[in-house]
Amino acid sequence: MTIDFAIILIPFIMAALILLFNKQLRKKYLGWIVLIIPVSLFLILTTYIPRIANGETYTHTYEWIPAFNLNFTTYIDGLSLILSLLITGVGSLVILYSIFYLSMKESLHHFYCYLLLFMGAMLGVVFSDNLMVLYAFWELTSVSSFLLIAFWHHRKASRAGARKSMTITVSGGVSMLTGFLMLYVMSGTFSIREIIANVEKISEHSLFIPALILILLGAFTKSAQFPFHIWLPDAMEAPTPVSAYLHSATMVKAGIYLVARFTPVFGGEMVWFWTVTGVGLITLFWGSFNAVRQTDLKAILAFSTVSQLGLIMSLLGLGSVAVHLGYSADTVIYTQATFAALFHLINHSTFKGALFMMVGIVDHEIGTRDIRRLGGLMSIMPFTFTIAVIGSFSMAGLPPFNGFLSKEMFFAATVKILQLDVFSIESTGILIPLIAWVASILTFVYCIIIVNRTFLGKIKPDIQEKNPHEAPLGMLISPFILITLVIAIFFFPNLLGEYILKPAMASVYPTFPSAAEMTPHISAWHGFNIELLMTIGVIVLGIVLYRLLKYWKKIYRIFPQNWTLNAIYERVITTSENVSESITNRYMNGKLTHYFIYIYISFVVIVAGTFVALDAFSWNPRLDAPVETYELLLVFIMIFTAIGLVFAKSRITSVLLNGVLGYSVAFFFVIFRAPDLALTQLVVESVTTALFLICFKHLGALKPEPSSKRVKVSNGVISILVGATVTLIGLAVVNYEKFETISTYFENSYELAGGKNIVNTILGDFRAFDTMLEVVVLFIAGLGVYTLINLKAAKKEGADIENK
Amino acid sequence: MESLIMILVGILASVGTYLILSRNIIRVILGTAIYSHAVHLLILTMGGLKKGDVPILSQSEGPFTDALPQALILTAIVISFATTALLLVLAYRTYKTNGSDDFHELREMPDE
Amino acid sequence: MKINDVILRTVVKGVIFIILTLGVYLFFSGHNAPGGGFIGGLVLGSAIVLLYITYDLETVHKKMPFDFKKVAALGVLLATGTAVGSILFDAPFLSQTDGYFNIPILGEKHLTTVTIFEAGVALTVIGTLVTIILSIGEDE
């Protein structure tokens, strides 16, 4: 067990422990105990920083199912280290914050269990080198996100939001799985590193582009890219720490991670460049455009997250040009878009995390997040106000905060790309900086809205009555750490660049010889260039647009209400539910007999049909063993008993006839040299008969079948067809001579298994796995019987617990 | 002998099917019990009948009958006992809760 | 399930030991002769059920204070335990081993881990069988 496995496993183990020892743990301390995990993991991971910065990578393989190429390989390089530091670092802060945020009345153990589950899954995603393992962890993050969004599951909106996010991200995940399988078909390996190393061999394959698109679908749904972003605003029903953690800092970055990880594979393709850049830019614009009209603080932040994710995504798209061009002294400049993407990835987590925590504080202390009801909180909550100002200004791209640096680099990247003449950039390329610029103006507008509407102006009278006050210290620690980082990164960006970003650049561009060359020196001031002019334009136009907001806000009403993406999504879901329901109801009519008839008819048609179609009838009676008179007698007894069963009028008769059948079978076992079977059959048959008789005490009498004659005849015909088909198979299979028998192997039972009873050695040794599982099944059946009998119907509780 | 047993298996399967297609729970369970008899005989016959001695090394020098089908059937016998028990209890639980053991009548009952 | 039947009781008193002995014999002879975990378990289980039918629940329960659900669980644990146990000895999952041991008084005996596995099987069969019959019988 190496340390990398431990890092992934520890959160899962802790999650299990919480549930096991839930009763023993005091709720008061639960959060603090949980906090140990991410903090210590974070500290362990920081020890990797210098070694990773030296260009080392760490791989460990645990063979899981080697026959299927499924190995649990962990891979730590620069890229996965960034994400893992975010996961554990922000995770620690969020858990610290939620200790104060969540009331003791909540089911805290569930909350922390889900949170740890998520943490482990997310670490698994970024550390896995095997695509299948990555996929498994990927879906696990969706599941834990689902559980966390629905944490307040008594609220309808929570459940709806959880379901929506699950539907969208999981369908994306499935398409991603298909893409992974295509990659496997092409390359013959599930290892990402091996695929990257052999990329030239697969890039001409006809499945290459489909795989690219399918994997991107997975990344886009997870990272809330247009038009799949609609789940993210609804996911804001989750408790605010969850929103800060999953839905802004980590989980939604999984898609970004995936795109960055696969840039060396697909980056050379034009489809990749235009899809990633285009979708990113549209998302950037659409997110910021929609954020402006929201009135709920959390909704503003949700759309702003969507928009910022689009920004990072488009940067990764721009950066992929360098992969297409290949390494040369001129092309290194295009890698800077990717550098900016990774830089902004970190920056976004710091300021957005702080902003979410700020909103949580406002919600917690004031009781509302509606900006129409808020205002003037500056004097009451000066610390919270500071957090809001720094976070928003960083997001808006103002100095002296880290957002300014990455936003400048973003502008620079969009402008620089225009100089290229690949991918037909010259015709539509000008749109890239233009959209980026417009979206940034809108970003600026909603940042002012967050600060102004919440903290400036007058306090609304109804809030004044509640006597609001500043948040407790515990809730302020985490956001303050984050905004300290926001400022610190602005002043010392190159520390981050040198130690964290440089090795990550090496993972995104493995073919480029020097990571140092791709790591620019970040500086806040580089003269009056076009980026700075763009920023100044953003500020000026942003202020103007904010002032004129009430005049141009009308454009939001242009879109017809029933054609929004949400409405379309709802319609698709409702329609498909209705259609599938109507189809299902047509044949699933609740009558067991009918279901059986479907099964039998398909059985007869498929099996007997194949026999007829392939002319597969075969019958070798010459090899049959001779028939003795007493055997014939036994056969006739069984036939008469069986037919008698059909006409039996009372249940006792039926059961006894069944017993006769069972004992006759036992006789056959004796005749056919199977003493073990005969013994078992005798005992089981007696016990089964006894069981039937005991149960009859509780069951109704056997009534004559109320079915009509026509039904009986058709049932009879089906039965005879089924029986005939079974005989047909049996006759074809028996004495089949094409294959050697494998049974001679087991006749060495004494040498191989040390037993002389071959049947018993098969059960206990050769095929002990079957026996083991059978024992488990037997036990489960026994428990099932016990439970069914002792189950007392639960008292019906009030059906409506909606929004309690 | 093998062909004869196969015909017997077919008849048992027919009877089992007919019982399963009835509306009464007890008949359906009896049908499954008869199915298991049929299937046990089918599997045993597939290995060939009376082709050798009892598959115990100390009893003879061989040739032995095929032991693998016997091992499979031994497992199947015990499992079919467990499932029969479960089905029976399910049936009587249903009967107690709904007061009916007719599948068509149960269909009309509102879901709980 | 209170049946006051003198004949049954007298017969059962004599027969029960024969059945129990047969069950144990079948269980142990399984490796080299007909018998084994399933059959042994079934015979022992039905013997116990017979006891419950002949005498009332309380009497038998006083003499045999087992929770048969737990007996079955123990059986499953034994069966899966030997399976997992082989991993600890660096052998593949579910490997069985055997050997000859010289035991005082009994002389040289053939012992295998299959017996533990089979014991698990037998205990599960006994536990499940008795649980099923008792649950149904007890329910009113």
Image (cartoon, coloured by chain):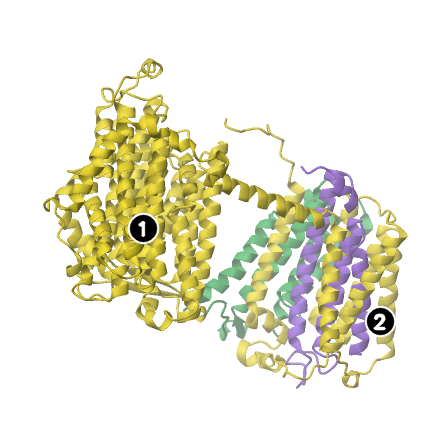
Chain colours: A yellow, B purple, C green
N-terminal of the pair, mark 2 or mark 1, is 1
Q: In this picture, is B93 found above or below A360?
A: below
- The x, y position of residue A519, in whole percent, is 16, 56
Of the numbered discs in the image, which one, if any, rests on residue C33?
A: none
- Work out which residue is located at the far front of the displayed protein and give it: A427
Structural distance between the alpha carbons of marks 2 and 1: 75 Å
Q: In this picture, is A386 found above or below A756?
A: above
Q: Which residue is mark 1?
A: A313
Q: Regarding mark 1 in the picture, which secondary structure is present there?
A: helix
Could one spot residue A80 in this view of the protein? no
- The x, y position of residue A173, in whole percent, is 44, 53
Left or right? Give the position of A76 relative to A780: left
Q: Which residue is mark 2?
A: A635
- The x, y position of residue A603, in whole percent, is 72, 64
Left or right? Give the position of C121 relative to A236: right
Q: Amino acid at mark 1?
A: Met
- The x, y position of residue C8, in whole percent, is 80, 51
Residue at x 21%, y 57% (from the top left corner): A419
Residues tagged 2 and 1 counted as in contact (Cβ below 8 A): no
Q: Nearer the viewer, residue C70 or A231?
A: A231
Foreground tag (2 vs 1): 1
Left or right? Give the position of C64 relative to A274: right
Q: In this picture, is A741 found above or below A368?
A: below
Q: Amino acid at mark 2?
A: Val
Q: Dot 1: within a 10 Å radius of its alpha carbon, few (fewer than 14), some, or many (20 or more) residues?
A: many
Chain for mark 1? A
Residue B110 lies in quadrant: top right
